[in-house]
Structures are given as structure tokens and as C-alpha cells.
Image (spheres, rainbow, N blue to C red):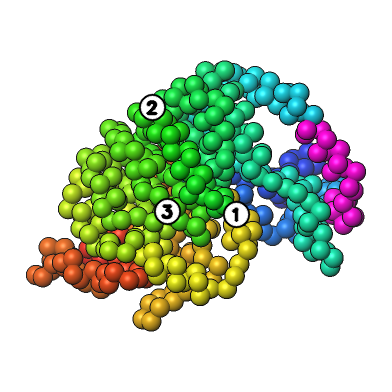
Amino acid sequence: MSRPLGIQRLSNELLKEILDCIDCDPDLSVNIDRRAYLSVESFRLPSPPVPSRAHDIGSFRLVCRSNAEIGREQVEHVLRSANRHLHFPDPSFFKAKADDQRRIVRSGEDARILKKAMAAFSSLQHVQILRLQDEADRILLDYLHESDTPLLHLVDLQWSPACIHATKTMAEALVYARSPFSRFSGPMMNPQSALVIKDKIPKMVPILASRLTCLELHFDDSQELNERIQQASGLFKTVFAAAKNLQALHVGFPSRSPLDLGLEEIFNYTYWEKLRAFGIQAWRLNAEEIINIARRHSKTLRGLRLRDVQLREGSMWKDVLVMLRTSMEQLDWVSLRRVDYSKHFDELWANSMEVGDVLLAGASDSDDEDSFPAHFSVPGSVVDSDEDDSDVHSLADTDHGPDANEIALSPNTTASLPFCTCSRSSDPASVDDLGDNGMFVVYQQRKMWEKWVIGQCPEHNSS
């Protein structure tokens, strides 16, 4: 009798281990210590595995008879899980879940456990506050969305109270544990949470801020945004004055609702002597405001992100670009994604179809997905592509690039320009060749400007 060959010689135990690798948990597809997990560009959940689990298990079973027997249990498990999801969600389960959450908050059990956890993390470096949705809630919301009868009004899921409570509780736990963390990320903060910290735990703020080397804040609520952020201006002043060791700073707002406050109302003319990367998103500004804060850090700044910044009437982007090109001593990259002029921005939105806030915010946690509800175009322009005009695809901003362990604030600036700007050209481009008309900015211009600012020749430095 011939001996089994190849895979048939493997033991059932080893085959089960192979199957475990195929049928893995998709939530574990991104390790927590990878840059993609921590990056400000990557707060979105991991993409679902392709092909599906059932397809992979089916392929595994087709290899040989032994695999068919071993994979049968996994198929039955997948079918049982799918069957559970097909039933109408049990209201009593969600009521019990809500009651349990209220009990935990009222008893302070969450704060007690969080303090204990923070004390145990003796080498903690990065803290994030994220808006998460468990599987049961996802199934419920999917059911309500797909129902023929309007049912969403029956469910009240508010992020604001959760964000406020999470921010307050986390701050208390970090101070209690004397945590050594140095990075804080809040990609979907509610402005009201800043006011709660300001009013209820003001003494903790300077203590926590003094430890920071990296601070990433993105506020996702556009309701009365200017008023609420202005009310928190005193807190921003306290935080930025205490955060003397900041190396990277990003403060952003919803792309659909640019903040209409002066830059220094938030940053209060603060100078950070170690600042290497600075980013703002969704702001209406004068050119001089950008110039002043960049010039203040001209000796240290290596990266500058001006995403969704709209210049007010009377300002020109070319004034900002010339200053960045001639006065920044170490600037390696600049991101101008979706920059424009305020008047043109308002005209685009006024002429666009009405889209609700839920659809605009989308399901993604990343501000990288916060784009216009429809693609706009102007005569002679190329429609912007969110995929092409993304900050996440730069080689320098990957897990394996040269800056894999550096601050996660580097963009993609690759583009082709219409003219040569290096020494090989007998007629170098001037500011007038930038094509800034003071009315609108299109995709090709932005990509060309990004390279021009850092002195790269579009013709001879195409990589």
C-alpha cells in the first residue's frame, strides 16, 4: 500500500493550525504596534477579508478528504453565526445592555477599572479616544436601515455624551496613574468635551499637556462649531502653553463646515521649539495667518499640512507658497489637499445637492474620507480624485518606508508639473507661473504647488 504524499502526511493537529490561519479574525489583521493602526490617516476599521471566510474554508476542504472532515466543523460554525444574524434583533437584549451601561457609569465602575488599567500600563505611549460600535449595535442599525418601515427614530445613539464621559474619565485615570504617555489622538472629538475638561478638571490639563510630544485632534460636530470652539479658547491656550515638547500637532474640523475663527484664537501665538510637523484642517483664514505661524517655526518645521483650508477674500495662495518656498529652512513636504478660496467653496456647496450630515460623515473614522458629497468641476479643470489626492499613499508614510517610526503626518506630493524648475532650465519658474487666479484652485494646481514649494523639479524629480 502506497504511503500518503505531500499534504496528506500532515497530522490533523497541524492541519487545524493551518485552518486557524485561514479562518482568522479580521479584527486582528492590523497589529496594534503597526503604524497603520496608530496613524491619524488610519482610524478607519480594517477592511473585511476578501474572499469571504466561507469561500476560504470551502477551498481548504477541497484539497483532500482529511481537510474536508476537519473543515466541516468550521462551516457549521459559520452557518450558525449567519443564522443568528438573520433573526429580528431582540429588543430586550438592547434594553438590558443600555441598563447595564447606565449602572456601570453611575457606580463609577468604569472609572475604577480604567484607573487600574492605566496604572498597569507602565510603558504606555499613545492614548486614543475612538467612537466604536460593537457587532450587536451594527446588526441593529443595519436592520433599521434596511427596513421598509422607518424605524431609525426609535433608536437614540448620541456620541456627544459618550465622548464627554470618555474624555473626562480617561483624563482622571491618566493623572491618577501618572501615565508616561506622550501621544494623544482624538480623531472624532466633540467640542463639548473640551468645555467639560475646562470646567470640571482644569488642574489636570497642564499636567497632561506637559507630557505630550504629539497631539492630534479632529472635531466632528459642526453644530454651533464657531461658538463652542471659541468658548474653549481658554483651554486651548492652557494646553498649548503647557505642551512645550510638542513635535507634531494637528487640529482639524469637518470639511463641510470650516472653522471661521482666527488661527491665533486657538494657537495664541505659541511657539514650540521642537515642532516638526504641523497640520490644520477645514479653516477659513487670511494668507497672513498661515505665513505667520509657519515663519514662527521656520527653523524646525519639516512637514506642513493645510487640508481643506479656504482663503478669505483679499488673500492669495501664491503669497503663502512663496513664503514657504523661500523662508522655510527644513521643510520636506507640504500637503494642500482640497485647499481653495472661501467664496468658491461656498458657491460649490450652495449649488450642490443637499446631503445629510450622516452621509457626509460616512462610516469611516478617518478624516481622509471626509470629502465633498459630489465631485465638482470648473472649466478646464480635472475632477479631484480622493484616491489620488490622498495623504496615505506616500512611501514616506507607510509601515515600511524611511519614516516608519516617525510622526504620522506625512503626505503624498507626487505629481507632474507643466514646466521645469531646477537648474537644468534656463528660465526658472516665477510666482506668476503658478497659475493662482485668486478665485479657485483645482487638483493639478495643488499637486504642482506642493512640489514647487519644496523645490522639487516636476520634470526631473518625478518619483
Assess disc 2: are there few (<14), some (14-19) or many (≥20) residues with their C-alpha within 10 Å of its C-alpha: some
Question: On the rendered image, what quadrant is the C terminus found in?
Answer: bottom left
* Residue 296 highlighted magenta (yes or no): no
Mark toward the viewer: 2 or 1: 2
Assess disc 1: are there few (<14), some (14-19) or many (≥20) residues with their C-alpha within 10 Å of its C-alpha: few
Task: Kindly check if marks 2 and 1 are in contact, taking CB atoms under 8 A apart as contact.
Answer: no
User: Can you identify the residue that label 2 sits on?
Assistant: 242
Q: CA distance from mark 1 to mark 3?
A: 25 Å
Above or below 101: residue 35: below
SS type, badge 1: loop
Residue most toward the bottom? 379
Residue 66 visible, this angle: no
| Residue 103 % position (x, y) | 80, 29
Name the residue rendered at 39%, 64% in the picture: 342
Above or below 140: residue 236: above
Q: Which residues are magenta?
A: 81-102
Going from N to C along the chain, the mark reached first, 1 or 3, is 3
Mark toward the viewer: 1 or 3: 3
Going from N to C along the chain, the mark reached first, 2 or 1, is 2
- Horizontal side of 105 relative to 122 (left or right) equals right
Residue most toward the left? 426
- Horizontal side of 140 relative to 30 (left or right) equals right
Q: Quadrant of residue 388?
A: bottom left
> Any mark on residue 403, and which?
none
